[in-house]
Each structure stands twice: as C-alpha cells, then as structure tokens.
Amino acid sequence: MNKTALNKLISGRNTAQKVVMRAKIVLAQQAGHSKVKMSKDLKVSRPTIDVWLKRYKEQGVAGLLKDATRPGRKPQIDAVKEKQIVEATLQTTPKGATHWSNRTMAEQQGVSKMTIQRIWKKYNLKPHLVKGFKVSKDKKFIEKVTDIVGLYMNPPPKALVFSVDEKSQTQALD
C-alpha cells in the first residue's frame, strides 16, 4: 500500500520533517506496531497518530503532504460596525480638522486604531490625501461597492462584466 511512495518521502532530501514524521507513522502502522509503541518510538501523541492515520486512509499519500486548512480568527467587529466606520469616514469630518486620522476615528468609534487601518485598507480609503481623495456622499456607497466588487471577484458562470463610464471620474463625483 504505497510503501514505495512513503519510503521515498522519508529518504527525500527536501522533504519537510513534519511530512517525514507522518510517513513514519503510516509505515509503523502498516508494520503492525501498536499506537502505544508508535507514540513512544516516534515521540508523538496518540491524537496526532490518529489524525494522520485517518487522513492517510481518506486521502492516501497526498493527505500527508499538507496541513488541513483552518478557519482563522473570527472578526472582532461585525459588518454593521464596519459600515458605520466607512460611512463616518466618507460623510463626516472631525471638529477642528479637515480629515479623519486613524486615531481620531478610532476614538470616536470606540475601536482600536489598527481596526480603523484594516477597514480603510480593505476599502482603499485615504482621507489624509486631500488632492487624491474624493468623498462620496452616496448613502448606499457600501452596498454599491460590495455589489460591483463582488461581480468582478466572483462573476456568475458564463457572464461578462462590462464597465461603461460616460463621464470622467471628477465629473461623475461632482
């Protein structure tokens, strides 16, 4: 059962050590070793052995080559709060200033400045660029951007997306 491929992984000069360990687990199981013996000899936990034997059973040698994807960190703020921050950036200005800084916006919204930076980067907002930044007064700006970007990033099957603009950017915003 793929002993040749497993031995090739173990003896390969460029094989990652975690992959070598996974291949050793499978070979030890094929040789008839108990999980207790494998755990002791290979210095890995029983749950680790169970994970990689299961993965090998389901996917074969390919299942040993890469880690499973993980869900990642859950967002700290919800879409409603994010929308409020974007709208405040686009439609308001702080007292005594011409534009928002990430610190003043963070203080006003009750979030960290890094949260503001991430949101501004996500929407490519640069309120500090006075000459290059046009503020859209559209109340449905977020929904429109989301729809348009969604079409470009994930178009429906067999669809073409065209962009037609009859005015220059400056004229359209004015």
Image (cartoon, helix red, strand yellow):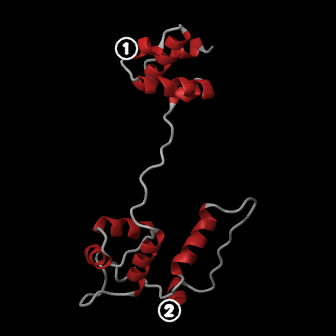
40 relative to 93, above or below: above
Residue placed under numbered mark 1 in the picture: 40
Task: Please indicate whether residue 112 sits to the left or right of residue 125 in the image.
Answer: left
Residue 80 or residue 130, whichever sits in front: 80
Identity, as a three-letter code, of the amino acid under mark 1: Lys
Identify the residue at horizontal 31%, vertical 70% (top origin). 111
33 relative to 21, above or below: above
Residue 78, located in which quarter of the rendered image? bottom left
| Element carrying mark 1 | helix
Residue 145 or residue 31, whichever sits in front: 31
- Residue placed farthest to the left in the image? 96
Q: Nearer the viewer, mark 2 or mark 1?
A: 1
Instruction: Looking at the image, tell me whether mark 2 or mark 1 is earlier in sequence order.
Output: 1
Residue 171 or residue 147, whichever sits in front: 147
Considering the image in quadrants, where does the N terminus appear? top right
Image coordinates for residue 32, horizontal then vertical, percent: 53, 8
Residue placed under numbered mark 2 in the picture: 174
- For disc 2, the neighbor class at 10 Å (few under 14, some 14 to 19, many from 20) is few
Image coordinates for residue 49, horizontal then vertical, percent: 47, 23
Is residue 66 at all visible to an observer of this figure? yes
Image coordinates for residue 72, horizontal then vertical, percent: 44, 50
